[in-house]
Image (cartoon, grey):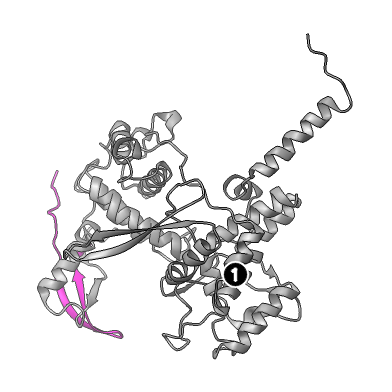
Amino acid sequence: MATMRYQHGSLKKVERKEGLTWVLRFLVTRPEDGKRVEATPIVVGLVRDLRTKSEAEAEVQRLYLRDKINGPIAKGKRTFRSIAQAYLEDELLDPTAMKPKTPTTQYCYAHIVRDILIKRWGDSNAEEIQPSDVEEWFHCLSKDKLGNNSYEWDTLLKFRNVMGLIYAHAQRKKLISPEVHCNPVRPPELGGARCKSGSDYEAIILTSKQTFEILNALPLLQQTMVVLDAGTALRYSEIAGLQWRDVGWDNNCIRVERTWIRGKIGRPKSKASKQPVALSSLLAKCLRAWQQETPYSKPTDWVFASEKTRGRTPRVGNMLVRDYLYPAAVEAGVMTAKEEKTVDEQGNEVARRTFFDKQGRQVTRFGFHNFRHSLASFLTAKKKTDVKTAQRSMRHSKATTMLDHYTQTDMDELIAAQELIYSAIFQDRTVTVN
């Protein structure tokens, strides 16, 4: 049987609407008669960005475009890199995909595929990777093996899930054999790679008093953001995406129309996330006060516009957290800070602050999301709000998501629960000691 030579394609400059562009030309087999004909060229990049042919060639290599123009060399010889790249282009990053992902999920999954999975398995035969190989890799990356310089098992489980999406896509598109044993991350009950679940991370839950004390330590802008988040549990991307026209002053609600993530406008995470949130009189008063203060108060302006960009974009969340929320949390007694001096790569001495919670554990994550956790715990554990109302307040698709991942019960609630059972057991009865 004749074999097809591996084709490299040819780079060419063509004039397009966006400007002079590098494209990769290549041949395909026409299905109706089997003849080799030129296919629609693949865009590599603009000439103004890739000035020389060698730079364009490097971009072809970086995007694995030759893996795309060459089908499988032979059955069972697909590399993991080729099926991973096919998943990225045909499903994850394709806006017309059957189930398009949100921009945040796209960014996260693409990072896992390109920087984690391809880096480890790229040159491996996709059908020859064994479940035991994947399990050993997970163990080597885990804290069980490496301590702090490693990944949480929850993160490794996400790696496994993304790897599973890649294999599912490859088998659905017949890039590899549909046989179950060709997928190393098939369900564990079918012999696939296993991965622990669970994380040591536990979100700091703020009491209403602590939230008030944090508010007192903040300027008006940050105060308004915290009041908004503490009462609505909006995600920061949703807070950043708010415009004044989304605030329904007359019908007492705030519409969630868009998100702002990494410099781009996106859509809400799910159907439940698109639900409007309540606008109480106190929250409306706080928003009105900020609207009168900000120079960006027109209907199409961002509610929390950046002064640096003269209102063209919203404020950046991580800077707000580090510059304002962390110091305010320390002032409120939620955390303690320890100053340390370290040496940077240039040999200069620099000061670094490390934060600890009340139990003495180092705080690695603290921000607007903690108010979301705190609201869930307040509604369900403290105020015994019915689950459906709490779920609707959090805008979760499922009540179990809120109860399993967001709600925490403090010691006061545990003691109260214990006293309930003791009260029922003993009532006015007298215990006889034998």
* Picture coordinates of residue 293, whole percent (x, y): 59, 88
Q: Nearer the viewer, residue 161 or 174?
A: 161
Amino acid beneath label 1: Leu
Question: What crowding class fits label 1: few (fewer than 14 Cα within 10 Å), some (14-19), or many (20 or more)?
Answer: many
- Quadrant where the image shows the C terminus: top right
- Residue for point 62% across, 50% down: 402
Classify residue 319 by image quadrant.
Answer: bottom left
Left or right of 412 on screen, residue 145 = left
Outermost residue toward the top? 434
* Picture coordinates of residue 34, whole percent (x, y): 23, 57
Q: Nearer the viewer, residue 31 or 322?
A: 322
Query: In this figure, which residue is indicated by the disc labeled 1?
Result: 215
Q: Is residue 173 visible?
A: yes
Q: Secondary structure at mark 1?
A: helix
Outermost residue toward the right? 428
- Residue for point 52% across, 51% down: 203
* Picture coordinates of residue 39, whole percent (x, y): 24, 68
Q: Nearer the viewer, residue 318 or 5?
A: 318
- Residue for point 29% across, 34% down: 136
- Residue for point 46% across, 67% down: 321
Q: Is residue 392 magenta?
A: no
Q: Which residues are magenta?
A: 1-28
Q: Is residue 19 magenta?
A: yes
